[in-house]
């Protein structure tokens, strides 16, 4: 039985939320598989160490393109068909990446993987149409916890698989999993057919007016861009720090990354507390936790077991701050307008640009000032967000159906 866009059930089946969470995680993971195995990929495809960085850059560029030009389609096209078609493209791109022996082919596949992976950002707002306002924070929190787990697990999983079977196996396995997921979603998801009020060109142009119309959208996007920038800076440089200071191998770094996954527990907790009206105070708390995390990393340096344990704690608390604040922001922006595909696309684009800036700053700072400069810059980013947060007036976000 098809579900109309304005129908919200009082209780979303737990199996459907679990499926959406798993789907978001499995899809988003494709953005990060290549990050820890750039070296082996470069050897196979003939990319130099410097040029291999294009793999991550093109994937990120593709993702932003998808956020700006594909995600808004969910406001005018039937969502299940859009999801299915995009996932088929993703499977083809993953297969292309797995069997690429030439740099141009792999880089092209990376760009397409980035574009088609935005399906995860179609599914998150889709989930909000299935539930009531009172449950929205919990549902978004649960779905986002799956997405964040996928992001955090992607790096260690890719490292482990590559060490055993080679980097090509990472993309082959992902293509198989996404193919099976496509079949499952095409059968399990309720249909959602929006009532298109404008053509595609008008739709894209209207995204700019949404950003101008809703100050809270701009504010929440900048909050998250600052925190995600710090997050990206940390995870870009901490593998270098672990290798240089602690002599860790690729597998050791993978185990460290697994420990950081614990921070994803903050997403569903933040969603539930946001439903109780605690969004504002939790936002400030997330920024303070991020600042404190980098402060500890700066103050306690060295290569002892104690500092390594502290670094694990920092990874977990930083991940908690970023994942928790992400859910808080999404709960608010989904209450601003029913054009949630476009709103989500704008929000994700801005904060993903923040992540790209953080990664670039991390590479530069570690090369020129080591871990001390890197952690100071990491501390500065959420600190600036906190200063901006303190200018926020208390407002009540009302749904605009």
Image (spheres, rainbow, N blue to C red):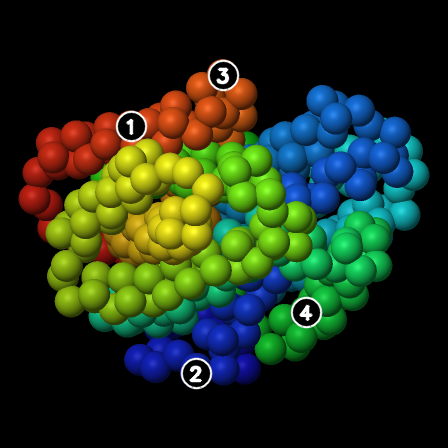
**Image point (33%, 34%), residue name:** 298
Q: Secondary structure at mark 3?
A: helix
Q: Mark 4 or 2 closer to N-term?
A: 2
Q: Nearer the viewer, mark 1 or mark 2?
A: 1
**Image point (54%, 82%), residue name:** 1
Q: Mark 4 or 1 closer to N-term?
A: 4
Q: Nearer the viewer, mark 3 or mark 2?
A: 3
Q: State the CA–CA distance, disc 1 to disc 2.
A: 42 Å
Residues under numbered marks 4 and 2 in contact, where contact means CB atoms less than 8 Å apart: no
Left or right: 357 in relation to 297 = right
Q: How many marks?
A: 4
Q: State the CA–CA distance, disc 4 to disc 1.
A: 40 Å
Q: Mark 3 or 4 closer to N-term?
A: 4
| Circle 3 Cα neighbour tier, 10 Å, few/some/many (<14 / 14–19 / ≥20) | few
The image quarter containing residue 395 is top left
The image quarter containing residue 133 is bottom left
The residue beneath circle 3 is 368
Confirm whether residue 250 shows in the render. yes
Residue 57 screen position, x and y as percent = 63, 30
Confirm whether residue 69 shows in the render. no
The residue beneath circle 4 is 181
Q: Mark 1 or 2 closer to N-term?
A: 2
The residue beneath circle 2 is 13
Position of the C terminus, as image quadrant, is bottom left
Left or right: 400 in relation to 156 = left
């Amino acid at each position: 039985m098809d579900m109309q866009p304005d129908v919200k059930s009082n209780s979303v089946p737990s199996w459907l939320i679990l499926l959406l969470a798993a789907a978001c995680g499995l899809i988003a993971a494709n953005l990060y598989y290549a990050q820890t195995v750039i070296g082996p990929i470069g050897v196979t495809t003939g990319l130099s160490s410097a040029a291999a960085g294009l793999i991550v850059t093109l994937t990120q560029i593709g993702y932003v393109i998808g956020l700006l030009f594909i995600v808004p389609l969910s406001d005018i096209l039937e969502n299940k068909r859009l999801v299915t078609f995009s996932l088929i493209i993703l499977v083809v791109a993953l297969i292309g990446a797995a069997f690429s022996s030439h740099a141009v082919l792999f880089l092209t596949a990376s760009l397409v993987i980035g574009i088609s992976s935005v399906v995860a950002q179609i599914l998150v707002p889709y989930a909000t149409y299935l539930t009531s306002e009172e449950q929205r924070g919990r549902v978004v929190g649960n779905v986002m916890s799956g997405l964040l787990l996928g992001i955090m697990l992607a790096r260690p999983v890719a490292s482990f698989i590559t060490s055993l079977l080679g980097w090509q196996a990472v993309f082959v396995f992902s293509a198989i999993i996404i193919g099976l997921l496509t079949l499952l979603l095409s059968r399990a998801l309720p249909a959602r057919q929006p009532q298109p009020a404008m053509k595609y060109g008008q739709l894209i142009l209207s995204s700019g007016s949404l950003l101008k119309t809703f100050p809270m959208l701009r504010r929440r996007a900048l909050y998250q861009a600052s925190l995600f920038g710090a997050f990206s800076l940390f995870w870009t440089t901490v593998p270098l720090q672990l290798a240089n200071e602690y002599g860790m191998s690729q597998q050791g770094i993978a185990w460290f990354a697994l420990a950081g996954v614990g921070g994803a527990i903050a997403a569903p907790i933040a969603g539930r507390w946001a439903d109780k009206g605690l969004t504002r105070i939790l936002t400030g708390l997330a920024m303070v936790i991020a600042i404190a995390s980098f402060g500890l990393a700066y103050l306690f340096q060295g290569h002892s077991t104690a500092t390594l344990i502290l670094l694990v704690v920092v990874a977990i608390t930083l991940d908690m701050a970023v994942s928790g604040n992400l859910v808080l922001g999404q709960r608010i922006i989904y209450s601003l307008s029913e054009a949630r595909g476009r709103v989500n696309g704008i929000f994700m684009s801005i904060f993903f640009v923040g992540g790209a800036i953080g990664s670039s700053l991390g590479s530069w700072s570690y090369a020129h000032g080591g871990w001390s400069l890197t952690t100071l810059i990491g501390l500065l980013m959420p600190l600036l967000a906190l200063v901006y947060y303190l200018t926020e007036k208390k407002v009540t976000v009302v749904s605009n159906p």
